[in-house]
């Protein structure tokens, strides 16, 4: 069974969906660690409820990204982590982790990439007045949401305010991410 770590910075709704998929038997993998760059993040409470150990850090306490990624890498290797799953982690992954986990870091993004990369993708889509946005699961590379796409799902947002568009997109995220992880972590054919 593959072992993975979730990296998250916020409330942890995608992490929660993944942990629930494991509990419900829809995801055959073991989450062995939560990593967060926000020591006050609500995702820590969710991890505790699921019995997931956590490592939180303050990036400014380190001299460089390389320094905190090296510390994280030691922990990942100690726990024999096979994959890194980004779930609302609001930092670019650096060369230390990219080199250690080539094609084994996944991310979910709230748009149909390559449209609307980066922060506030839902706001970008609403500002552009597009009728449809969506969700993308992709491998992580050194760029901002530029890695190879694994799967996408469309979401109608025409006429939505930010709250409704966010609700619709998150609903799809919570369904899509566990399904894609099941396929990738268990080396099944991934749907497009």
Image (cartoon, helix red, strand yellow):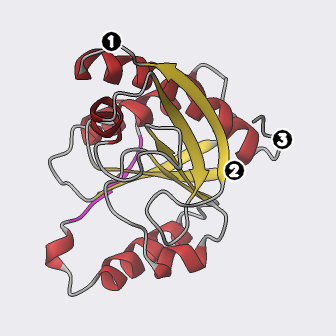
Question: Image check: 158 left or right of 28?
Answer: left
Q: Where is residue 176 in the image (x, y as percent from the top left)?
A: 59, 28
Give residue 128's quadrant in the image.
Answer: top left
Q: Is residue 53 magenta?
A: yes
Between discs 3 and 1, the one toward the N terminus: 1
The residues bearing labels 1 and 2 have C-alpha atoms spaced at a distance of 41 Å
Q: Give the range drawn in magenta.
A: 52-57
- Mark sitting on residue 123: none
Disc 2 secondary structure class: loop
- Residue situated in front as seen by the camera: 19 or 147: 147
Residue drawn at x 14%, y 74% is 60
Disc 1 secondary structure class: loop
The residues bearing labels 3 and 2 have C-alpha atoms spaced at a distance of 13 Å
Residue matched to label 1: 159
Disc 3 secondary structure class: loop
Residue drawn at x 56%, y 25% is 154
Between discs 1 and 2, the one toward the N terminus: 2
Residue at the right extreme of this rendering: 189
Q: Which of marks 3 and 2 is in front?
A: 3
Residue matched to label 2: 2
Question: Image check: 82 left or right of 61?
Answer: right
Question: Image check: 45 left or right of 170?
Answer: left
Rendered position, 71 above or below 166 = below
Residue matched to label 3: 188
Q: Position of residue 119 (x, y in %)?
A: 30, 50
- Residue situated in front as seen by the camera: 67 or 81: 67
Q: In which quarter of the image is the C terminus?
A: top right
């Amino acid at each position: 069974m593959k072992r993975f770590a979730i990296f998250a910075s916020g409330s942890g709704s995608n992490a929660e969906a993944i942990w629930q998929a494991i509990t419900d038997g829809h995801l055959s993998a073991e989450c062995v660690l939560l990593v967060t760059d926000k020591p006050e993040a609500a995702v820590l409470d969710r991890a505790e409820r699921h019995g997931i150990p956590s490592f939180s850090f303050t990036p400014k306490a380190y001299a460089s990204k390389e320094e905190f990624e090296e510390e994280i890498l030691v922990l990942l290797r100690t726990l024999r982590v096979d994959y890194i799953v980004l779930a609302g982690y609001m930092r670019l992954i650096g060369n230390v982790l990219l080199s250690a986990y080539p094609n084994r870091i996944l991310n979910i993004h709230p748009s149909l990439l390559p449209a609307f990369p980066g922060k506030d993708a839902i706001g970008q889509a609403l500002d552009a007045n597009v009728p449809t946005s969506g969700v993308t699961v992709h491998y992580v590379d050194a760029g901002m949401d530029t890695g190879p796409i694994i799967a996408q799902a469309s979401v109608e947002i025409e006429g939505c305010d930010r709250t409704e568009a966010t609700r619709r997109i998150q609903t799809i995220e919570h369904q899509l991410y566990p399904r894609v992880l099941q396929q990738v972590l268990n080396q099944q054919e991934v749907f497009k």
